[in-house]
Amino acid sequence: MDRLRAMAVFARVVACGSMSAAARELGTTPSAVSQTVRALERDAGVALLLRSTRRLAPTAAGRAFHEGCAQMLAAAERAEQALAQQRDAAVGELRIAAPAGFASEYLGPALVPLLRANPRLSLRVEAGDDRTDLVASRIDIAIRVGRLADSTLVARPLATWPVVVCAAPSWIARAGAPADPRELERADWLLHDALGSPQTVEFVRGRERRAIRVRGRVVANDQGTLAHLAREGMGVARQVNPLVAADLAAGRLVRLLPQWSVAPVGVWAVTQQRHRLPAKVRQALSALREYLASRSDGAG
C-alpha cells in the first residue's frame, strides 16, 4: 500500500509540475512529497526527476514510470466511480428470487417504476417455490412467504397477508360445508410442502381455538398448482388471500368456516447483508414495500 501511495504522489508531482503544488493537492508538506520521491528514486536506483531552482521535469525513466503511475491512478478513479455508482445509483443487474405466484402477481408491477426510472438497471428473476441459495446464485433479494428458517441471512418484513381455508363449490357439494374445524380433519387437503405432511392447522374464533391435524392428498411446492387443484374440486387448500382473491370474488373458490380465522403469514425480503446495501437493493426493497402496502388485499 505504501508503494502504491508513493506512486500516486509521484504522478501528482509530474502532473502539477512542482513539489509544493502537489503537496497542496495532497494535503501534505513539500518536504514530505520530496522525501517520498527520493525514496522512490533510491529504491529504483535511477533518477526520476530533473530538478532546478525554478522547475522540475521527469527524466526518461521518470516519464516511463509516470505513464504507469498515471494509468494506475486512472484505474483507481474508475474503480471509485464504479463503487460510488453502486452505492448511490440503481445500476447493474438486480437478481431476485421469489415464489412463482408472488413473482407473476406482484414482482413485475412493483418494480416497473424502478426500472423505468433507472434505464441502466437490469432485472433477473428466479421464480419458484424452492429455496434458492443466495450466495451460490448471487441473489440480491429473496422473497419468502411464511415461516422463515433459521439462518445468518437478514430478513426484512414487507407485508402481512391474511390466510383463508377454501375449497371449490363442487367440493362443498360433494363433502358438505363444515360447521366446525374438526370436520376438516378427514378431508382431502392440498398442502404446501414447506411444512410437510401431516400439518397442524389452528382455527381461532374469539377465545375459542381448534387445532386440527391434517394430511395432504396432494403436497406441492407451488401454490399456483394447489390453487388450480382446489378450483377443480380436488380438496381443501390453505392459501394466502391475495393469491386467491379473484377466485373468491368470482365464486370459483369459497372460504370455509368464515367465522373462524387462521394465522396470517409474513412476507419477507431476505438479503445477505444488513447494512451498506447497494442503491439498487435499497430502492427495490422500498418499491416492494410501497407496492404491497398499496394493495389492500396484500397488506396486513
Image (tube, rainbow, N blue to C red):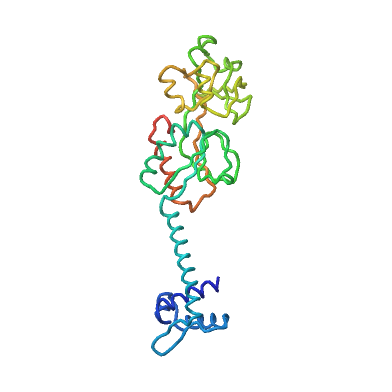
Quarter holding the N terminus is bottom right
Q: Position of residue 57 (x, y in %)?
A: 43, 83
Q: Which residue is located at x 46 percent, y 36 percent?
A: 159
Closer to the camera, 211 or 197?
Answer: 197
Closer to the camera, 66 or 170?
Answer: 66
Q: Is residue 131 above or below residue 87?
A: above
Q: Which residue is located at x 46 percent, y 39 percent?
A: 158
Q: Which residue is located at x 60 percent, y 30 percent?
A: 195
Q: Residue furthest front?
A: 60
Total marks placed: 0
Closer to the camera, 296 or 129?
Answer: 129
Q: Can you tell which quarter of the image residue 294 is in?
A: top left
- 215 to the left or right of 101: right
Q: Position of residue 51 (x, y in %)?
A: 45, 87
Q: Which residue is located at x 47 percent, y 45 percent?
A: 94
- 199 to the left or right of 126: right
Q: Position of residue 299 (x, y in %)?
A: 42, 33
Q: Is residue 34 above or below residue 120?
A: below
Q: Can you tell which quarter of the image residue 216 is in?
A: top right
Q: Is residue 124 above or below residue 68?
A: above
Q: Is residue 173 above or below residue 65?
A: above
Quarter holding the C terminus is top left
Q: Residue furthest bottom?
A: 53
Q: Position of residue 275 (x, y in %)?
A: 50, 52
